[in-house]
Image: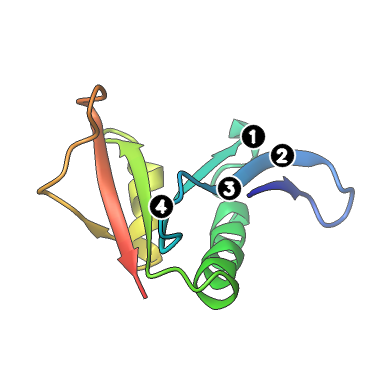
Amino acid sequence: MYWAITLKETQKLVGTICLWNFSNDKLIAEVGYELLPAYHKKGIMNEALSKVLEFGFGTLNLNSIEAFTHRKNKASKTLLIRHHFKFDKNRTDKGFPDNIIYILTK
């Protein structure tokens, strides 16, 4: 499931966010997102992630949502922690040793 992130005033496309990589039982999904650098630190991704989490847990009835991010991506880690994701120190992203995994459970 993929959504465009647009500016409210102009409908200009500034990023995307998605739920993907669903588990076979459809109870776990991964969230992915990107935002044009000019729009960082404006609360846009915070708002988009809130809506996607609401949809994932409320409408899709997911049990958990995972996020994989580069260990040096401070902005992404801050966003995830702000939304109560927890760092999973026991898991690794096979093939991507610099990625770390955060999980949010219902």
Q: Say which label, 2 or 1, has the lower sequence index.
A: 2
Residue farthest left in this picture: 90
Q: Say which label, 3 or 1, has the lower sequence index.
A: 3
Q: CA distance from mark 3 to mark 2?
A: 14 Å
Residue 8: % across, % down: 82, 57
The local crowd at label 3, few if under 14, some if 14 to 19, many if 20 or more residues have their Cα within 10 Å, is some
Helix, strand or loop under label 2: strand
Q: Say which label, 2 or 4, has the lower sequence index.
A: 2
* Circle 3 residue: 18
For this view, does 3 lie left or right of residue 58?
Answer: right
Q: Amino acid at mark 2?
A: Val
Quadrant of the drawing holding the C terminus: bottom left
* Circle 4 residue: 24
Q: Nearer the viewer, mark 2 or mark 1?
A: 2
Residue 24: % across, % down: 41, 52
Residue drawn at the location 83% of the way across and 41% of the way down: 12
Residue drawn at the location 89% of the way across and 48% of the way down: 10
Q: CA distance from mark 1 to mark 4?
A: 37 Å
Badge 1 vs badge 4, beta-carbon distance below 8 Å: no
Give the camera-side residue of 71 and 37.
Answer: 71
Residue 15: % across, % down: 66, 40
Q: Which mark is residue 81?
A: none
* Circle 2 residue: 14
* Circle 1 residue: 38
Residue 41 vertical placement versus 105 (above, below): above
Badge 2 vs badge 4, beta-carbon distance below 8 Å: no
Residue drawn at the location 58% of the way across and 47% of the way down: 18
Helix, strand or loop under label 1: helix
Residue 105 vertical placement versus 40 (above, below): below
Q: Amino acid at mark 1?
A: Ala
Badge 2 vs badge 1, beta-carbon distance below 8 Å: yes
